Amino acid sequence: MNYNTEKILGLLIDGVSEIKEVESIGISGSKIEIPKAGEGDIDVFIYCDEIPKLEKRKAAVDKLGNLLQERKFNVFEGGHWGTGDFVLINGIETWLMYFTIDETIQNTNLILSGEYLDKLDNYYYPIGRCAMLKNITILYDRNKFLASLKEKLFDYPEELAQKLVQYHLEELSDVEDLERAVARKDVLFYHFALELAIDHFLQALFAMNKIYFPSRKRTISFIKNFRVKPEDCEDKLLEVVRLGACADNINKSYELWAILINEIVTLKY
């Protein structure tokens, strides 16, 4: 009998939900979107009283037999992505990431209080975890842990927005590397400095709009729907990058960037 990816994923979720320690399971995104093989992966977030032993996790996966083309366990342990197991479903990489509920609550509270105002290791955005949890699709929720967390995250804390905006606008005021790159017409150095500056710009802009910054993916699509933003923000950002790719146009790129910075600093939110 042939099973499509959604059916196999459902069987996998059913198996994992039967593990005693598992309380809640969700998939990132506001709806289940199954990617094509090679075009994306499936992230399954699993919240537990305590991380189930390897034997239990392995048993839940092994129930699916040859419906899975590949499986690996303890690919990573601890850290930002929990304890991670990997399976391949019809060529689609699927990650099972286990977290404890206590750790998740503590981490979320720290993020919301403004403890983490910037990205961490290898472009991990703590605030992005709040974005994921707010929009997570709940597949299993024994005691309504995920439902209550989503409710808690529904309103963006005003104090958090103020802390993020202040921090990132202060970082934007440091233009030494940008100006040095412009003076030298050094394209690669300019883009290094500009990348850092754009990151601060985006995080400030998302905070002004009371949107948890998810990551650097699909940024322009988000900005198009923002109420608070500089005039023609999306077009100006893209033009800053385009002009900065040529040594002869670096000055024009930086002039336009300076206009964007002046505008975001004066925005009311």
Image (cartoon, rainbow, N blue to C red):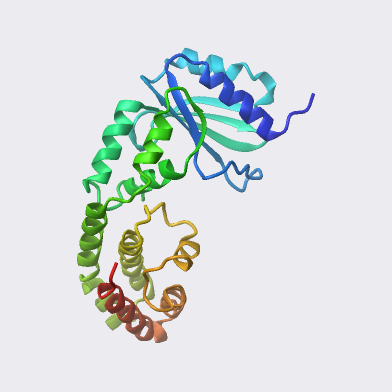
Q: Position of residue 214 (x, y in %)?
A: 41, 51
Residue pushed farthest right? 1
In the rendered view of the protein, which quadrant contains the N terminus?
Answer: top right
Q: In this orientation, which residue lies closer to the viewer: 70 or 157?
A: 157
Residue 82 placement: quadrant? top left
* Residue under the point 45% across and 27% down: 24
Q: In this orientation, which residue lies closer to the viewer: 224 or 35?
A: 224
Residue 179 placement: quadrant? bottom left
Q: Position of residue 164 (x, y in %)?
A: 25, 57
**Vertical placement of residue 149 versus 180, above or below:** above
* Residue under the point 47% across and 40% down: 136
Would you say 2 lies left or right of 232 here? right
Q: In this orientation, which residue lies closer to the viewer: 37 or 236?
A: 236
- Residue 44 visible in image: no
Would you say 251 lies left or right of 94 here? left
Q: Position of residue 64 (x, y in %)?
A: 64, 20
**Vertical placement of residue 163 versus 181, above or below:** above
- Residue 55 visible in image: yes
**Vertical placement of residue 69 versus 91, above or below:** above
* Residue under the point 51% across and 44% down: 29
Q: Position of residue 12 (x, y in %)?
A: 59, 24
Would you say 60 lies left or right of 190 here? right
Q: In this orientation, which residue lies closer to the viewer: 68 or 204?
A: 204
In the rendered view of the protein, which quadrant contains the C terminus?
Answer: bottom left
| Numbered marks: total | 0
Residue 226 placement: quadrant? bottom left
* Residue under the point 57% across and 19% down: 15
